Image (cartoon, rainbow, N blue to C red):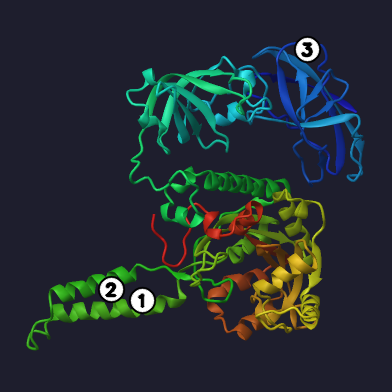
């Protein structure tokens, strides 16, 4: 056991700064702050589980407060008495190594582990201030444990868009429900007619208002915990009520897709955007906590990682060709006698060369449908890496599950086989999702061959599928849905697929018929993750390229990874929009990305 002495500045209302300590790998530590006999304001600290350091290097420690301090529990938060705002005082910090067994946590009845917040969930009597903005977010008022009631009497400047409004007192004042996008909740705002030349300009749905006023408790019996009595209308962004596309009734997702530039103002799309943000943050948090290195991969490539050729072509030659053709149309060729002139001959030759060069770009620069090939080069040098970015597929698909431009998360694990790849994929999905179906039970793992047998048994018992069930087929949506929603009723990992239906870079198994590939299937969404152990054997990889009929030249760099210091490695890809679909329950992938791109839609 050892003692450390550290100094923290407590600024009540703004939260505390997280404390970071180096830890011994694979050990559990108990940390306590003896904060007895401190008076003053209370700071809320959220519960979390005791941290176990598992990394091969140092790890960040979430502070654990000893339960013996004079603290109280309120609304799931630990309240610890602290001194006044801005007070600095010395804290004696005790750190004890409890065990070297990572499976044995500290006694739960003696510890209350906490993470230090800066999310506004405090019970400070003052409003949370913004560092770079003058206004107070609606979230910091309404998303408190008391619903904002503890802020009564505080003066604030808020802004937002009017969702609903109504005139009261024969037009002498108006009630507005205002939301600024910081949270789903709406703040009720009361505006007297004396503060505006025309209250009707404020009550139209979609109007943006900036108001200054005082928070006050509403009358008893109302649903609001706090409301704002406006003292000054700072500015008003009016709405053209004739052309505003969102009526008072709830617009359908199909209607919202017509107005991509405005649909984020609706509760539905705004909530999806906040969940998407949380999932993106969780993605980086998960891989960073597991010592993965974030790598940026290129968008333009000559390598088709899927081998399907469904890639957008990138070229400037089309515009050059069109320009030459237009010039010849505006200035038509002269007579036969003049056609022999050098200028005309040169122009025609230039046009012919441009068309020839254009035809040769078919196998050249494209927008890639995957990131993994380039990522492997860094995994074979730096260990475990991941990338998170946009990708493209030129498939002419109009289904609710496909986009031409989408985001993908792809990790690569050095010295990992298929089992470790599946372990990582399952842990990542469970980390991302709070659904009990996912978080509470292990995923089912079944080979492709066994999955086919289960489907055949279902057919024998009277189940009908549009797509025939036989070994060697790509599992269709109906097959994947039957496995996840009927047979197992939980997420399923299918692995060891026939090599004929998988990409060339997947490792061939010893049977010579299957490859070490896996798909994570989840209810409703179907395939969420696709991954594999990569083929690290040079000769086998060359044979696979020849079998599929891919040219060797564009993949020489990829083969170099096998020629020079090859190593076993695995990875997977997660379509981020499908993860958002799964987390939100939305039906169409076009509603979970801000600006969807699909055949016939690339405006804005």
Q: CA distance from mark 3 to mark 2?
A: 78 Å
Q: Residue at x 66, y 76 (%)?
A: 502
Q: Nearer the viewer, residue 71 or 161?
A: 161
Can residue 568 be seen here? The reply is no
Label pair 2/1, CB-CB below 8 angstroms: yes
Please state which of the two labelled residues, at mark 1 or mark 3, is closer to the viewer.
3
The residue that mark 1 highlights is 358
Q: Position of residue 537 (x, y in %)?
A: 71, 75
The residue that mark 2 highlights is 321
Question: Would you identify the image quadrant in which residue 540 lies?
Answer: bottom right
Can residue 547 be seen here? The reply is yes
Query: What label sits on residue 38 in the rendered view?
Result: 3
Q: Nearer the viewer, residue 380 or 292?
A: 292
Q: Residue at x 26, y 72 (%)?
A: 322
Q: Nearer the viewer, residue 226 or 437?
A: 226
Q: Is residue 73 above or below residue 387?
A: above
Q: Residues within 10 Å of mark 2 (few under 14, many from 20)?
A: some
Q: Position of residue 305 (x, y in %)?
A: 58, 71
Q: Residues within 10 Å of mark 1 (few under 14, many from 20)?
A: some
In the shown orientation, is residue 56 left or right of residue 300? right
In the shown orientation, is residue 54 left or right of residue 157? right
Q: Residue at x 35, y 41 (%)?
A: 241
Q: Residue at x 28, y 73 (%)?
A: 321
């Amino acid at each position: 056991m050892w003692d450390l002495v550290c100094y923290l500045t407590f600024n009540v209302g703004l939260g505390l700064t997280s404390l970071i300590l180096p830890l011994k790998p694979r050990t559990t530590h108990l940390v306590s702050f003896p904060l007895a006999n401190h008076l003053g304001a209370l700071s809320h600290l959220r519960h979390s589980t005791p941290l176990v350091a598992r990394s091969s290097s140092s790890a960040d420690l979430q502070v654990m407060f000893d339960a013996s301090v004079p603290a109280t529990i309120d609304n799931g938060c630990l309240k610890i008495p602290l001194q006044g705002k801005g007070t600095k005082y010395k804290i004696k910090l005790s750190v004890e190594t409890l065990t070297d067994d990572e499976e044995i946590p500290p006694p739960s009845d003696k510890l209350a582990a906490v993470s230090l917040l800066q999310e506004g969930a405090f019970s400070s009597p003052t409003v949370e201030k913004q560092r770079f903005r003058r206004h107070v977010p609606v979230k910091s008022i309404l998303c408190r444990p008391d619903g904002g009631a503890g802020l009564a009497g505080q003066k604030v400047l808020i802004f937002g868009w009017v969702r609903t409004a109504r005139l009261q007192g024969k037009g002498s004042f108006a009630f507005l429900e205002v939301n600024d996008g910081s949270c789903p909740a709406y703040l009720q705002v009361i505006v007297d007619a004396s503060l505006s030349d025309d209250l009707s300009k404020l009550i139209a749905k979609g109007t943006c208002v900036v108001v200054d006023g005082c928070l006050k408790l509403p009358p008893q019996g109302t649903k609001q915990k706090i409301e704002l009595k406006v003292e000054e209308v700072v500015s008003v962004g009016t709405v053209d009520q004739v052309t505003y596309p969102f009526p008072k009734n709830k617009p359908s997702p199909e209607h919202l897709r017509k107005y991509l530039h405005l649909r984020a103002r609706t509760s539905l799309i705004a909530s999806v955007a906040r969940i998407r943000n949380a999932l993106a943050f969780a993605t980086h948090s998960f891989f960073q906590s597991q010592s993965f290195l974030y790598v940026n991969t290129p968008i333009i490539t000559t390598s088709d990682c899927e081998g399907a050729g469904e890639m957008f072509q990138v070229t400037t030659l089309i515009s050059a060709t069109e320009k030459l053709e237009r010039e010849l149309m505006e200035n038509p060729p002269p007579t036969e006698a003049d056609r022999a002139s050098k200028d005309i001959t040169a122009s025609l030759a230039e046009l012919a060369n441009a068309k020839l060069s254009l035809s040769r770009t078919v196998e050249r620069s494209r927008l890639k449908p995957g990131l993994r090939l380039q990522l492997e080069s860094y995994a074979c040098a730096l260990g475990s890496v991941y990338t998170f970015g946009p990708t493209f597929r030129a498939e002419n698909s109009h289904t609710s599950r496909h986009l031409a431009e989408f985001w993908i998360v792809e990790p690569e694990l050095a010295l990992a086989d298929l089992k470790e790849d599946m372990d990582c994929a399952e842990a990542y999905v469970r980390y991302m999702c709070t659904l009990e179906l996912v978080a509470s039970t292990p995923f089912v793992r079944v080979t492709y061959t066994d999955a086919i047998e289960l489907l055949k048994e279902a057919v024998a018992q009277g189940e009908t599928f549009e797509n025939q069930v036989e070994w060697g087929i790509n599992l269709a949506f109906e097959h994947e849905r039957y496995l996840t929603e009927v047979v197992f009723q939980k997420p399923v990992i299918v692995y060891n697929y026939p090599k004929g239906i998988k990409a060339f870079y997947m490792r061939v198994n010893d049977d010579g018929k299957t490859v070490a590939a896996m798909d994570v299937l989840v209810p409703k969404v179907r395939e969420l993750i696709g991954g594999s152990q990569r083929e690290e054997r040079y000769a086998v990889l060359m044979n696979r390229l020849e079998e599929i009929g891919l040219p060797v030249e564009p993949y020489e760099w990829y083969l170099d990874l096998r020629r020079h210091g090859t190593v076993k490695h695995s990875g997977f890809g997660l379509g981020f929009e499908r993860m958002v679909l799964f987390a939100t329950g939305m039906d169409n992938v076009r509603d979970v990305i801000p600006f969807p791109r699909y055949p016939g839609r690339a405006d804005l």
